[in-house]
Image (cartoon, grey):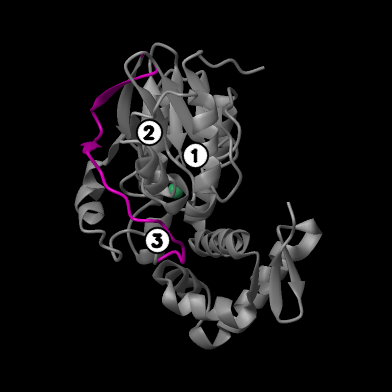
Amino acid sequence: MITLPESIRVFERGWLSSNNVLLVDDACAALVDTGYATHAPQTLALVRQALGARPLDLIVNTHLHSDHCGGNALLQATWPCRTVIPASEAGAVQEWDETRLTFRATGQTCERFTLTGTIAPGARLRLGALDWDVLGAPGHDPHSLMLYCADERILISADALWENGFGVIFPELEGESGFAEEQAVLEAIARLDVRLVIPGHGAPFTNVEQALERAFSRVAWLRADPARNAKNALKVLIVFKLLEVRVMGFDTLLRMLDDASVMRAAASMLKPRDEWPALLKAIVEELAARNGPLEVDGARIVARAA
Ligand SMILES: [Zn+2]
């Protein structure tokens, strides 16, 4: 049984939406990460149910992947809440610069939102009557942050550490360094005193040492052959898209590879352009095997009902 301080509630979500962490004290009701755009009404309902008549005062985003900030716009439209994001993303959000923000590059969507402030590594936040240190967590995303509460030994790890792995190392798909950063972040976590991790996806967990061990060996495995990271990225992005739209033709998916630069980069690491139809077919078939998340129905791909 995992016990959280009374001031913290975790809404564990599915694949499409990240977890949301609600931290409430007398001064402030804050939500860390807000899920995916298509789930925004669900996120709002969860927060509203937990807060009752009380408004949400603050949104904190660990990073700006669409599954972590897709509820921002609706929450902002509902309550006049402040919103703080990683400082290095402030310009991109202010200008809503779609080439710097990752939504289009990953074939995903996010409704435009605004920010009122920023946080960066070294900052401190008071959330849920607890002090949280803001830590940098590049690797999965160069701008990503984590929150660490030394008093309670709790880490809100976003996609830098899950119970079983971590998020796709996106920078490596575009020729940037990411494996070394992920390794360093894991080492930094190992140096902290952590009893409980609240990950971006999946249930909170206390077997931190085991999770770190798995994560370290996964970094080594990906590093040994970066095509593994590219293939994983394609799988993750394809499943994500199918969970969003439920049904898609192979031809539409193939067009997505051309349009979404991150998917294109991943596919290019694996096969030359003229072999992408076969590549997609093989990947989708893998995702459909053994009762996986997808099904193949002729020329269409269908998300298996959860
Ligand atoms: Zn992410």
Distance between the alpha carbons at the discs numbered 2 and 1: 23 Å
Within 10 Å of disc 1 (Cα), the crowding (few <14, some 14-19, many 20+) is some
In front of the other: label 2 or label 3?
3
Relative image position of residue 18 (x, y in whole percent): 51, 43
Which disc, if any, is residue 292?
none
Q: Which residue, given by chain and number where applicable, does mark 2 sit on?
A: 146
Q: Amino acid at mark 1?
A: Leu
Relative image position of residue 207 (x, y in whole percent): 60, 24
Q: Earlier in the sequence, mark 2 or mark 1?
A: 1
Q: Is mark 2 within 8 Å of ligand 1?
A: no
Q: Is residue 139 visible?
A: no
The answer to which of 238 and 108 lies nearer the viewer is: 108
Q: Please identify the quarter of the rendering in which residue 56 is found.
A: top left
Residue at image position (22%, 48%) is: 90
Residue at image position (23%, 38%) is: 118
Q: Horizontally, is 32 left or right of 228 in the view? A: left
Above or below: residue 171 compared with residue 165: below
Q: Is residue 128 visible?
A: yes
Q: Amino acid at mark 2?
A: Met
The reply to whether the magenta stretch includes residue 112 is yes
Relative image position of residue 144 (x, y in whole percent): 35, 43
Residue at the extreme right of the image, as rendered? 290
Q: Which residue, given by chain and number where applicable, does mark 1 sit on?
A: 44
Residue at the extreme bottom of the image, as rendered? 274
Q: Amino acid at mark 3?
A: Phe
Which disc, if any, is residue 103?
3
